[in-house]
Image (cartoon, helix red, strand yellow):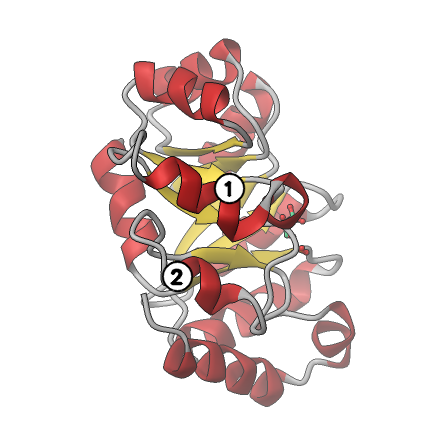
Amino acid sequence: ACKRTAEICQAAPVVPVLIVDDASTAYDLGAALVRGGLPALEVTLRTDCALEVISEMAKVKGGIVGAGTLLTHQDVKNAKAAGAKFGVSPGATPALIDACEAEGLPLLAGAASGSEAMALLERGYTWQKFFPAEAAGGAPLLKSLSSPLSQITFCPTGGVSLTNAQAYLNLPNVVCVGGSWVAPTDVIKAGNWDQIEEIARTAHSTLKS
Ligand code: 3PG
């Protein structure tokens, strides 16, 4: 599972965080992001059609689709059944970790502090989401953890944008960031896939891990 989350985090400097209201846009959205150079896609389970979005997006060649906002064992089952290849959660509980391990879904679990990161490390999770990144202390907090918890690599998410992403990526314990800025809701609603591709391409080409 750890190997799989490592691959996902190393696929590109940005993991798009997607909130999609209309499953009929899912394939085109995923394809545009993949064309722009961002293959790992996190579909949050925050809309009624999220599972359908995962199923549709899973058809995009070259994409790796995961489910975000996993909270319960049922979420994990549903995500897996829909075709998710990995899961992301805002935090971590023993029950959620057990569920992902039982269902065989690699988990990028969230931690917001040294103790939370250590609890995940005890369970063998050396790749973690740092959430909510900006609110919890931003790049200075992760920099502070980089020496005492050097085994852990983080994907900061929450308040990350093209403006502050590089400050995270410059840290030794960060290889990618997560963010919704690469797929703005209004651009998805307008079906402007060229614009999504362009935003993704800009992120891919300007950010270096
Ligand atoms: C989320 O769960 O919404 C992610 O953290 C994305 O946050 P962002 O919208 O600040 O990128």
* Residue 84 appears in view: no
Residue 188, compared with residue 198, is above or below; it is above
Q: Quadrant of residue 166?
A: bottom left
* Residue type for callout 1: Leu
At x 63%, y 68%, the residue is: 181
Residue 175, compared with residue 96, is above or below; it is below
Number of the label disc, if any, that sits on residue 58 = none
At x 52%, y 22%, the residue is: 92
**Numbered disc 1: secondary structure:** helix
* Residue type for callout 2: Leu
| Nearer the observer, 70 or 30 | 70
| Nearer the observer, 91 or 113 | 113
Q: Quadrant of residue 59?
A: bottom left
> Quadrant where the C terminus lies?
bottom left
Q: Which residue is mark 2?
A: 169
> Quadrant where the N terminus lies?
top left
Q: Residues within 10 Å of mark 1 (few under 14, many from 20)?
A: some
At x 32%, y 47%, the residue is: 173
Q: Residues within 10 Å of mark 2 (few under 14, many from 20)?
A: many
At x 63%, y 39%, the residue is: 136
Instruction: Please state the horizontal and vertical placement of residue 114, each as a whole percent of the image.
Output: 46, 25
**Numbered disc 2: secondary structure:** helix
Mark 1: C-beta under 8 Å from nearest atom of ligand 1: no
Q: Which residue is mark 1?
A: 141
Q: Nearer the viewer, mark 2 or mark 1?
A: 1
Instruction: Please state the horizontal and vertical placement of residue 12, each as a whole percent of the image.
Output: 34, 65
Instruction: Please state the horizontal and vertical placement of residue 71, each as a whole percent of the image.
Output: 61, 25
Distance of label 2 from label 1 (alpha carbons)? 13 Å
Instruction: Please state the horizontal and vertical placement of residue 20, each as a whole percent of the image.
Output: 69, 58
| Nearer the observer, 58 or 41 | 41
* Dots 2, 1 in contact, CB < 8 A: no
* Residue 201 appears in view: yes
